[in-house]
Amino acid sequence: MTRARLGGPAVALVLMGLLAALFAPTAAWLARTWQVHPYYGHGWLVPGVAAAFAWRARARFAQGEPADAGLALVAAGVAAHLAAARWQLYPVSASALVVVLAGLAWALGGRPALRAAAFPATLLLLAVPWPFVEHTAPFLAAGVARASAAAAGGLGAAVVQHGAELSVTDGAFTVGAPCSGLQSAVALITLAAVLAGVLDGPWRRRMALVLLALPLALAANWLRLTGLLWIADAHGSAQGLAWFHGPPALLLYAAAAAGLVAAGRWLGCDVRGASYGDA
């Protein structure tokens, strides 16, 4: 197999056309879902960021020789897509598209191209809205309700908890899925993954940075809900809700993002000379 057979402009155009036609329903589902999904509103940004990382590593796509094994991965991805399309399992189909793209990189440029495509492919997978992610919201909401009630009570607020309902002097709040912190957690994990690609350092330390995103997001949401309860008890429910939904909420998320950057420096990672392909 020669690079000319797989890598010519005509072949590339044909492959792009076939992929566009084959995965058009999946792309339409992703567009609709990103537009309305409460936890994946940032999904629109991810393909562009992934493409930027792929472009950054473009020289590595030409370092290897074409590999037939990549075609097997493409075939597996297409087969998974066709099976998923029959049952409209769009998250499976979207993941299969990422597998196909990785397989094409492998087929066209061998292992160096596959390694270069691994990080952009991982970012794309993080933008796939899987139902199981949404199903964690009630558990997170219950946990943050207990922790915030305990913290606000420790600060002197008269908080009474009945399951997901938290009562203060002049009102009650129900901690549901929107208050679980899942939205900020999903976005912050994606941001951490982008930072892991930008920073230079051992891959284990960059993976640790991604793992830190979840506790940072949950801590920010805990502070947000604790502040709501304390302010509502001291100044009324309206003031508490103004805190929860107002600028302080954005500031807490910004603080969590800044915490990621600080954690990256603490882990010994540096943006200078960064290359996501180096370990």
Image (spheres, rainbow, N blue to C red):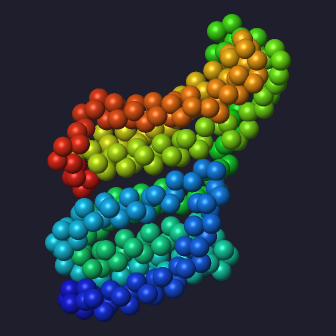
Residue sticking out furthest to the top? 156
Residue 67, position as x, y percentages in the image: 26, 80
Up the image or down, 235 lies above or below 255; here it is above
Assign the N terminus to one quadrant of the image. bottom left
Residue 180 appears in view: yes
In this orientation, which residue lies closer to the viewer: 245 or 274?
245
Q: Position of residue 76 (x, y in %)?
A: 46, 78
Q: Residue at x 25, y 38 (%)?
A: 269
The image position of residue 32, as x and y in percent, is 62, 66
Left-right relation of 9 to 71 = left
43 on left or right of 202? right
Asked if residue 79 can be seen in this view, the reply is no
Residue drawn at x 47%, y 76% is 77
Between 10 and 80, the one nearer to me in the picture: 10
**Residue at image point 68% right, 28% down:** 242
Q: Residue 111: give x, y in percent of width and height.
A: 24, 69
Q: Nearer the viewer, residue 77 or 40?
A: 40
Marks counted in the figure total 0
| Left or right, 10 with reference to 146 | left
Nearest to the observer: residue 85 or residue 271: 271
Q: Is residue 142 above or below residue 199?
A: above
Residue 248 location, quadrant: top right
Whether residue 195 sits left or right of residue 180 in the image: it is left
At 23% from the left and 42% from the top, the residue drawn is 271
- 267 versus 8 height, above or below: above
